[in-house]
Image (cartoon, rainbow, N blue to C red):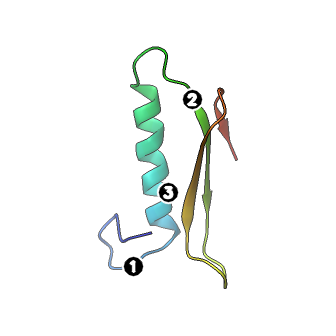
Amino acid sequence: MDDLNGDGRSDIEDARLLARVIDRMEETAPAGVIPGGLAVYGANPVHGPFVHLDSRGYRARW
């Protein structure tokens, strides 16, 4: 994850921003585009914040 929102930090807010971009892309996608899963995860001692995105044929958020 990078500092996508320009606040000088790389944190869960950057992951949330990326998730919003993905949601908007899905909303405006042409017919026939297969929706998928999307989740935002915060940092822990093992990894930084990240966005999980998958293609499962239906919209899922968790």
Q: What x and y, as percent, mark residue 54?
A: 61, 43
Is 49 placed left or right of 17 in the picture?
right
Mark 1 vs mark 3, CA separation in Å? 13 Å
First along the sequence among labels 1 and 3: 1
Relative to 14, residue 57 above or below: above
What crowding class fits label 2: few (fewer than 14 Cα within 10 Å), some (14-19), or many (20 or more)?
A: some
**Residue at mark 2:** 35
Q: Where does label 3 land, which residue?
A: 16
x, y (%) of residue 39? 62, 51
Q: Could you tell me if the residues under marks 3 and 2 are in contact, i.e. CB atoms within 8 Å? A: no
Task: Give the amino acid type for the residue marked by disc 2 in the picture.
Answer: Pro
Please report the residue visible at 40 percent of the width from the left and 34 percent of the height from the top. 25
Q: Nearer the viewer, mark 1 or mark 2?
A: 2
Q: Quadrant of the N terminus?
A: bottom left
Query: What amino acid does circle 3 point to?
Result: Arg
Labels 3, 2: front one: 2
Dot 1 amino acid type: Arg
Task: Determine whether label 1 and label 3 are within 8 Å by CB.
Answer: no
Residue 9 tag number? 1
From what the image shows, is residue 62 above or below residue 40? above
Which structural element holds mark 1? loop
SS type, badge 3: helix
